[in-house]
Image (tube, rainbow, N blue to C red):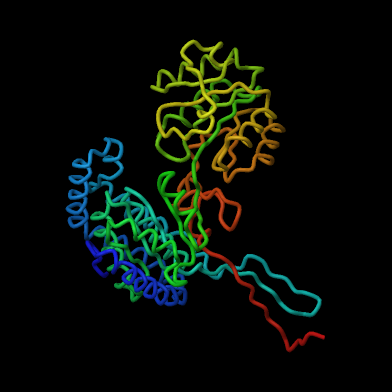
Amino acid sequence: MADTLHTPTEDLHAVLERMGTQARAASAALAKAGPDTRTRAIGAMADALIAAESDVLAANAEDLAGGKEKGLSAAMLDRLALDSDRVASIAEALRAVAELADPVGTEIARWTVPSGLDIARVRTPLGVIGIIYEARPNVTADAAALCIRSGNAAILRAGSESLQSSIAIANALRAGLASVGLPEDAVQLVQTKDRAAVGHMLTGLNGNIDVIVPRGGKSLVARVQAEARVPVIGHLEGLCHTYVDAGADPQKAIDIVVNAKMRRTGICGATETLLIDEAIAADLLPAIAAALTDAGCTLKGDDTAQALVTNVQPASEEDWRTEYLDTIISVRVVDGVEGAMAHIETYGTSHTECIITEDQETAERFLAEVDSGIVIHNASTQFADGGQFGMGAEIGIATGRIHARGPVGAEQLTIFKYQVRGTGQTRP
């Protein structure tokens, strides 16, 4: 892999264009390789990662030292940190992706038309995927494995805080690919902290990047969506809602809401707004609020919520639009499922929404009418995760309405083509 660390800005574009050309060639070879070869490759990537553990941990120690010097928060340092157990977990995640069904060549539909033509719609790789992400070293392995599983080459751009760890991981993954005869350049990592690299990738590198997938904070994703000249699979914010309906089981509601907010507050599937039916708010909201408070959560609410619970702080208009990613939740009392859906339509970001109710008819209406990538009945929004969906891993949660939506796993990194078989037909 070309070493682009400290490359002057004027040379960076040429380096990235060369990576794009190499990725395009590698993607052709990868797509031609059979599913068994791709499976063996991902297994070999896991083996190579375990073999390179000492190199990975040494590189991670550099990143951690740099992060402490920069004053990263304890939560950010924890996300960045690796140890033997975490390296083993990353390798196990690779093996889980290896066990997934290979989507390439899968027949989605097949039919015969009156002319006698036999038409099949089959899955095919997207080609070259550019993935831009922040300080999570495991994303280097997850993204690479999902791309290989789906027959795509990957150009990875890690966050500056995790660069050394990501380089060490990428080097191991490339060694695994080479060990089974696949081109190393099917996985390439941009080895520079220069933010101009992102801009170059967003141009598409002379047509060599087919899709960009951003995985990170609001500012990163917003920049990618604003500047990209190629299609983007990504989400801007995870402003998730949990609605407690009049038909909810009280204990189930308490358990789900606390988990949805507090299990991990910094993930995109964490609930940020609690909506509760006015018919049960007086009876149930104080108990839910007490459980959230006991778990360390601050509550901000509308006038009705404040009247029902003394420690609820006033919520502003901005609170309904805020992805806190923290131990804060906004609370609104609504006029039944209609009020809940209206609030979600106004303030939601099409990520993940939940309804808690034992009324099946109301639940089915919510599932059908709420227009988000993931809609859940009687379970925590923290299940908004590709691994929890049985996809092995994910690159992110897509909230758009084109191509992929919800968790983006191997299958979502494919497109389709039509294979048409005739017997000599000509069109009159």
Where does residue 303 sit, x and y in percent of width and height? Answer: 57, 16
Q: Quadrant of the C terminus?
A: bottom right
Q: How many marks?
A: 0
Where does residue 264 sit, x and y in percent of width and height? Answer: 40, 34
Where does residue 292 sit, x and y in percent of width and height? Answer: 45, 21
Residue at 64% across, 69% down: 121
Residue at 49% across, 46% down: 236
Left or right, residue 260 beside residue 164:
right
Q: Quadrant of the N terminus?
A: bottom left
The single residue placed furthest to the front in the displayed view is: 10
Comparing 100 with 18, the one in front is 18
Where does residue 186 sit, x and y in percent of width and height? Answer: 37, 70
Left or right, residue 223 beside residue 179:
right
In the image, residue 1 above or below residue 74:
below
Residue 307 is drawn in which quadrant? top right
Left or right, residue 305 beside residue 323:
right
In the image, residue 307 above or below residue 88:
above
Comparing 94 with 142, the one in front is 142
In the image, residue 315 above or below residue 204:
above
Comparing 104 with 202, the one in front is 202
Comparing 22 with 168, the one in front is 22
In the image, residue 341 above or below residue 34:
above
